[in-house]
Image: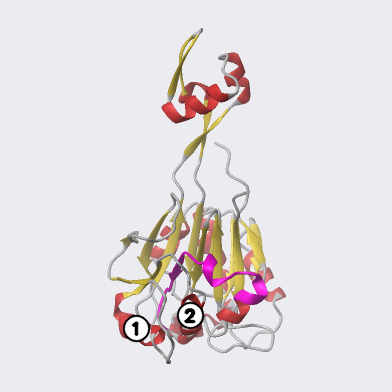
Amino acid sequence: MSRRELVVLGTASQVPTRTRNHNGYVLLWDEEAILLDPGEGSQRQMLHAGISATDLTRIAITHLHGDHSLGLAGVVQRISLDGVPHVVPVSYPASGARWVRALCDSTAFHHRERLALQGLAADGPVPRVPGERHGTATLRAARLDHTLEAFGYRLDEPAGRSLDPARLAAAGIFGPDAGRLLRDGSLQTARGRVTVDDVSVLRPGQGFAFVMDTRLCDAAGDLAEGADLLVIESTYLDRDRALAEEHGHLTALQAARVAADAGVRSLVLTHFSQRYTDMGEFVAEARSVYGGELTVASDLDRVPLPRRRLV
């Protein structure tokens, strides 16, 4: 059975707290498991969440600040220790290559990992690499506006079609013939030639967006546009907007407005400054502009993608 959900490993920003690990996330998408921004402690949080190194099909890093990347060292060594048989691509801003290489070889261990390091230098699709495990969804990256080079990510599956049982019956197509119709695109029946379009409805593809450390910028809205699930940083409350701007971050209000303007169906706020203890303030701030599904994330939350949109 396919599974599509976000597993939250950590929700703190620069400084972890007693209740919040450095941030980190795993997107489970059918047979894929994409580890996003593995901050310090991600390996242990994966254990608590029931996710193994063998599950991982890709690691995607938005930028090379420690709270988004220090956990890479432990995860890579675990991939090696467990003998993960497939290639695991690691995407990151190309300007951070020296730090990524250092994290992947940070201590003495027997290197058995099969990594493909992918430095990103421009907006656009993230290339597939030989030997990686992946489905049909496409991953792209777009440059954000932080205090050093940072990219956000967007995963989209192609649109498809779902067979309509009533239309199939009306066309006299039953059982294995339905599978043949899907495979071949058309089928000759006693009532004439029937195409897939004749007996199906459009099934929009689902989309996931991941926007971490950034000021407000066009790329944040572009990545979020029409997403079924948006994970976005909200380091500050809006009363501290000047601090957010200075340090290259968003407030909860700004993040929620991005989601509202983009028509996002389910919004996950995360990456909270340790200065705040009342998370109800984040809920109230987001709810003042956003009316969809809202999660103010806690460590080890699991957030499913909403049901598919209907045409």
* Residue 96 is one of the magenta-drawn residues: no
| 34 or 123: nearer the viewer | 34
Residue 68 bears which disc, if any? 2
Q: Quadrant of the C terminus?
A: top right
For residue 57, above or below residue 170: below
Residue at coordinates 53% horizontally, 52% vertically from top-left?
Answer: 263
Of the pair 195 and 232, the residue shown nearer to us: 195
**Circle 1 residues within 10 Å: few <14, some 14–19, many ≥20:** few
Quarter of the image for residue 10 reads bottom right
Q: Position of residue 93 (x, y in %)?
A: 34, 75
Who's the residue at 47% across and 82% down the image?
Answer: 77
First to last magenta residue range: 46-64
List x then y, in percent, for residue 232. 53, 68
Type of amino acid at the residue the image marks with label 2: His
Image label count: 2
Task: Please name the colour scheme applied to the rendered image.
Answer: secondary structure
* Residue 254, visible in the rendered structure: no
x, y percent for residue 281 = 68, 75
The answer to whether 166 appears left or right of 222 in the picture is right
Q: Residue 60 magenta-drawn?
A: yes
Residue position marked by numbered label 1 in the rendering: 101
Residue found at x 62% / y 51%: 306
